[in-house]
Image (tube, coloured by chain):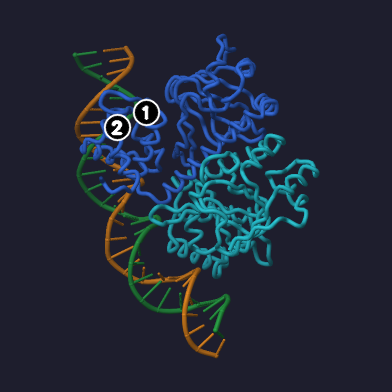
Chain colours: A blue, B cyan, C orange, D green
Amino acid sequence: MLTRNAIPQPHSEYLQHAGLFRGLALSVLDEVAQLARQRSSQNDAFFFHQGDPATTLYVLIQGRVRIVQVTPEGQQVILRIISPGEMFGGIAALGEASYPASAQALEASVALAWDGETVARLMEEYPRIALNALRLLAGRYQEMQDRYRELATERVERRVARALLRLLRQTGRKVENGVLIDFPLSREDLAELTGTTLYTVSRILSGWEKAGLIETGRQRVLIRIPHKLVVIAEDLPPG
Amino acid sequence: MLTRNAIPQPHSEYLQHAGLFRGLALSVLDEVAQLARQRSSQNDAFFFHQGDPATTLYVLIQGRVRIVQVTPEGQQVILRIISPGEMFGGIAALGEASYPASAQALEASVALAWDGETVARLMEEYPRIALNALRLLAGRYQEMQDRYRELATERVERRVARALLRLLRQTGRKVENGVLIDFPLSREDLAELTGTTLYTVSRILSGWEKAGLIETGRQRVLIRIPHKLVVIAEDLPPG
DNA sequence: CCCTCTCTTTGCGCTGGCACAAAGACGGCG
DNA sequence: CGCCGTCTTTGTGCCAGCGCAAAGAGAGGG
């Protein structure tokens, strides 16, 4: 389900919105775009699997991708959800190594791809790219630290609330009666994001729905009163 | 308990062993060392606190430092233990922001320190530094991902085993009858590293000690049979 | 050498959330 | 329109690990 084409259209304007290439001159973006390949991935198909040799860095331009680790026993843990404009598979830029996790499309998705050597060369020529990467990676590291602390110290309900709020910030779409998480998100996905089971997530969401806090459907979550979620997520007095 | 001095001795040879400055010419290392300040920190003193404005990047040259996050409720989570040669407080290099965690000396420790602007300037002038930082950060990110998955999916005993093995690799010192974790490490420290309680850690270590696997004392852990720990940490058939 | 402070051990009761089971509800496809 | 596969809900039993309490055991200082 994976296709590779040379790119016909100029993606250079698009690239200036991608964090990795922020601040580069348009001429440079053109050069960068020229070197890219385009890869598409159907629903549930993988851009790469955990353990594959890390050869390629991607920037998502359409769709949604989840970065997931699988344990030897087959349990899955979602490390991150990638939205358009974000890079993934960045380890490729550092030579050697293999991917520490898999990248799976949650919807039909399109990404631009560069092989590791190309990225390394670009970084050398345009240090701004390396600095951008550093800043992006630092942000993700920090988020990961926070999630780690959460997992270590907070109860499930609060973790789920935080996960939803993160997704809301990252991919929320304002609609009539609230903010919609704008891609298919099952109870199981939420469980794998927060380190719990789909059963527990289901119970929690049911509770919130009864309280009028959210509105759910099959692989669909709409947050009606974000503020109340924040109250659950942080330890605020319910004012 | 924090002191600042200009540095009298040349630290430049030392710096070439620090990951951040690997591959730089000695002349450059001299320049870098010239720009450094030296900071010492007694037992339990902090290099910086979570929430402080991130102004300074450190490279530890002696002692041991733990990077720790505190929850609003006062629980602590140890994110990492820094050994000589490693950098910490690296967010400073990226301007803005405040430290997402605190850095506390576990022993009398000495570090070299640069302010953020200096580091940014150095990175611009010597892109190799930025690339080194990128590679180091990528490694830490990956380790954090792994620990996150562990915390989400593995039982406590296995997590403790893995934590010990990591420390063993990072700071183990071969001694007569095994490998010693070479800095004061209490049950509580191990609990905060693995997301559990000191009680549970104590019980687990007691069990292992009875089995002859390790040898412990007050803030002291000696691993007698590393291989058996690996068997517990991974899911190997006990062969 | 004793006193004190901190670290460690161990017993015990409790519970959050896991695991399994089974029934219900969508939604897409033929 | 009805079937089937997937996702979701809900009931129930259970246990790993938490939390408290209280008693040892070092280590260091006076």
Task: State the residue at coordinates (68%, 58%).
Answer: B5
Q: Identity of the amino acid at label 2?
A: Ile
Name the residue carrying label 1: A172
Left-right relation of D19 to B60? left
* Nearer to me, A56 or C25: A56
| Looking at the image, residue B133 lies above or below residue B3 | above
In space, the residues marked 1 and 2 are separated at their CA atoms by 9 Å
In percent of width and height, residue A200 lies at 31, 42
Q: Residues within 10 Å of mark 1 (few under 14, many from 20)?
A: some
Identify the residue position indicated by label 2 in the image: A223
x, y percentage for residue B122? 69, 39
Which chain letter matches label 1? A
Q: Quadrant of the C terminus of chain A?
A: top left
Q: Which residue type carries mark 1?
A: Gly
Q: Is residue A200 shown above or below A46? A: below
Q: Few, some or many C-alpha atoms within 10 Å of disc 2 (few <14, some 14-19, many ≥20)?
A: many
The reply to whether residue B159 is in sight is no
Foreground pick, A218 / A173? A173
Instruction: Say which element carries label 2.
Output: strand
**Residue A39 at what x, y percent from top left?**
54, 18
Q: Residue at x 58, y 52 (%)?
A: B166
Residues at circles 1 and 2 in contact by the CB criterion of under 8 Å? yes
Q: Earlier in the sequence, mark 1 or mark 2?
A: 1
The x, y position of residue B36, in whole percent, is 69, 50
Left or right of residue D13: residue A40: right
